[in-house]
């Protein structure tokens, strides 16, 4: 049955027309939220849970019954709590995190690419590195997909929280860098590709940055899928990608996929 659904997703991306309304998307969002709750978000990996919490807070998603305090109480290891604390902005818009938190037990050895995100979130308490764009440019080359994808996420938050602290020259470079990374993802993972993991995540991050390349992208097959109460699962196209499965595992793939689709739907009707 899942193979049939996957085949339909592939074929329909070429045959379907733009045949959904705002009401259809809202129904799909409500059904997707039910699926997310069924997948037990309290057991999500930190970065995926806080992203859900961010979406719930910013888009008033009543269908997501999340408890940040309950999630926090389950973290009994200081190493992981130190990292979770850095995401405070996702949980509370008024959160303040100071620079010393980047040098705690659980954060001192964080991968350089991961730390870039936290520099973008706290303009009044963590100093933005003068070479932030050079760091983003460098980290974007560290992986064919996740390099550009992760750095475009960082660019989204950089523009939202720290844009005023960029110089005119940096703002000019940011436009060019964002455009370059967006075209990479669009060409390699969106254009003429079937709806699977990489296309979903690429579409998500380009929509986050309001990129014109995906402004008229037909997402009707994805809307119809969740409008009809279909489940979250790892698509067959992704199941045969052994590198992807080894890197994340099916549980994390579903979490990332769910968040990506939620972003896509919410930004479609904002």
Image (cartoon, rainbow, N blue to C red):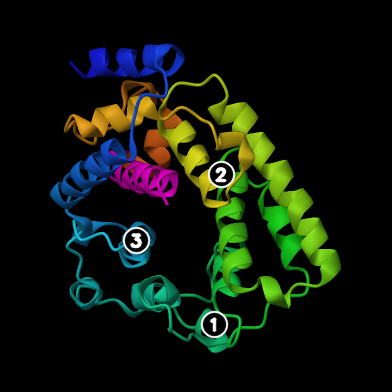
Q: Is residue 22 above or below residue 240?
A: below
Between label 3 and label 2, give the one nearer the viewer: 3
Q: Secondary structure at mark 2?
A: helix
Q: Position of residue 212 (x, y in %)?
A: 62, 39
Q: Which residues are magenta?
A: 250-270
| Residue denoted by label 2 | 206
Q: Quadrant of the N terminus?
A: top left
Between label 1 and label 3, give the one nearer the viewer: 3
User: Quick check: marks 3 and 2 in contact, CB under 8 Å?
Assistant: no
Numbered label attached to residue 103: 1
Furthest toward the right, the residue is 169
Tell me the residue at 49%/75% (across/down). Answer: 107
Q: Secondary structure at mark 1?
A: helix
Q: Position of residue 261 (x, y in %)?
A: 36, 42
Numbered label attached to residue 59: 3
Tell me the residue at 41%/30% (across/down). Answer: 219
Q: Is residue 208 above or below residue 46?
A: above
Q: Secondary structure at mark 3?
A: helix
By secondary structure, the bulk of the magenta-drawn segment is best described as: helix
The residue nearer to you, when weighing 59 against 181, is: 59
The answer to which quarter of the image holds residue 18 is top left
């Amino acid at each position: 049955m899942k193979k049939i659904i996957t085949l339909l997703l592939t074929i329909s991306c070429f045959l379907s027309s733009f045949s959904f309304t705002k009401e259809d998307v809202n129904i799909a969002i409500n059904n997707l939220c039910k699926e997310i709750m069924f997948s037990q978000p309290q057991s999500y990996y930190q970065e995926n849970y806080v992203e859900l919490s961010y979406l719930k807070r910013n888009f008033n998603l009543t269908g997501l019954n999340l408890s940040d305090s309950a999630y926090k109480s389950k973290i009994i290891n200081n190493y992981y709590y130190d990292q979770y604390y850095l995401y405070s902005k996702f949980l509370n818009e008024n959160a303040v995190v100071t620079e010393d938190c980047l040098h705690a037990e659980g954060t001192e050895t964080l991968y350089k690419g991961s730390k870039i995100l936290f520099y973008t979130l706290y303009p009044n308490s963590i100093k933005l590195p003068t070479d932030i764009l050079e760091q983003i440019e460098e980290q974007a080359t560290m992986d064919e997909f996740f390099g550009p994808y992760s750095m475009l996420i960082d660019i989204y938050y950089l523009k939202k929280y720290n844009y005023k602290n960029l110089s005119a020259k940096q703002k000019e470079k940011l436009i060019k860098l964002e455009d370059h990374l967006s075209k990479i993802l669009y060409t390699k993972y969106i254009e003429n590709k079937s709806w699977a993991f990489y296309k979903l995540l690429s579409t998500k991050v380009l929509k986050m940055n309001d990129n014109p390349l995906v402004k008229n992208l037909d997402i009707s097959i994805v809307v119809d899928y969740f409008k009809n109460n279909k489940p979250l699962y790892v698509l067959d196209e992704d199941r045969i990608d052994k590198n992807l499965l080894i890197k994340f595992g099916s549980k994390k793939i579903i979490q990332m996929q769910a968040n990506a689709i939620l972003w896509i739907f919410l930004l479609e009707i904002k």
